Image: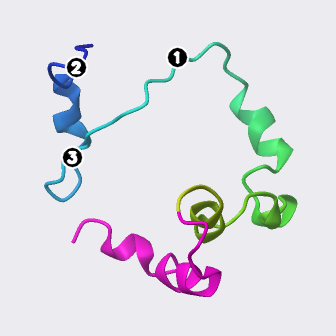
């Protein structure tokens, strides 16, 4: 993988609606679990998780990027329609 002088050629395959990523995270798999065990765990079912365990995008933004911003405005900006406008 090239350093500061370029991006890997596989970035072209990651393009969405003509937008090529500038950054990607490569993950090396160290251990794989049985698919049946994952299904039996119920992790994929919304009623088994803790929805409030992970803060909203707006709360993360306020905490790390824009501490002086109004949380209500950030919640409106990063609301349910946010993903629809990511790529124009």
Q: Is residue 46 left or right of residue 61?
A: right
Q: Is residue 7 left or right of residue 27?
A: left
Instruction: Examine the rendered structure and indicate whether residue 34 appears above or below residue 2.
Output: below
Q: Which residue is mark 3?
A: 15
Question: Which x, y percent locates residue 44?
Answer: 72, 53
Question: Which x, y percent locates residue 67?
Answer: 61, 66
Instruction: Examine the rendered structure and indicate whether residue 69 appears above or below residue 21.
Output: below
Instruction: Examine the rendered structure and indicate whether residue 61 appears above or below residue 21.
Output: below
Say which label, 1 or 3, has the lower sequence index: 3
| In magenta segment, residue 87 | yes
| Depth order, front residue of 10/46 | 10
| Depth order, front residue of 44/16 | 16
Image quadrant where residue 61 sits: bottom right
Q: Which residues are magenta?
A: 66-88
Assign a secondary structure to mark 1: loop
Say which label, 3 or 2, has the lower sequence index: 2
Assign a secondary structure to mark 2: loop
Residue plotted at (76% across, 44% down): 39
Q: Which residue is mark 2?
A: 4
Image quadrant where residue 52 sits: bottom right
| In magenta segment, residue 86 | yes
Image quadrant where residue 1 sits: top left
Q: What is the distance, in whole Å, between disc 1 and disc 3 at their CAs?
A: 21 Å
Q: What is the distance, in whole Å, between disc 3 and disc 2 at their CAs?
A: 20 Å
Q: Which residue is mark 1?
A: 28
| Depth order, front residue of 38/56 | 56
Say which label, 1 or 2, has the lower sequence index: 2
Assign a secondary structure to mark 3: loop
């Amino acid at each position: 993988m090239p350093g500061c002088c370029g991006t890997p050629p596989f970035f072209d395959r990651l393009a969405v609606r003509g937008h090529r990523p500038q950054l990607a995270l490569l993950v090396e798999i160290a251990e794989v679990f049985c698919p049946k065990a994952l299904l039996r765990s119920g992790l994929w079912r919304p009623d088994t998780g803790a929805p409030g365990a992970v803060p909203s995008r707006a709360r993360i933004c306020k905490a790390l990027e824009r501490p002086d911003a109004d949380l209500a405005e950030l919640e409106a900006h990063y609301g349910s329609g946010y993903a629809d406008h990511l790529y124009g």
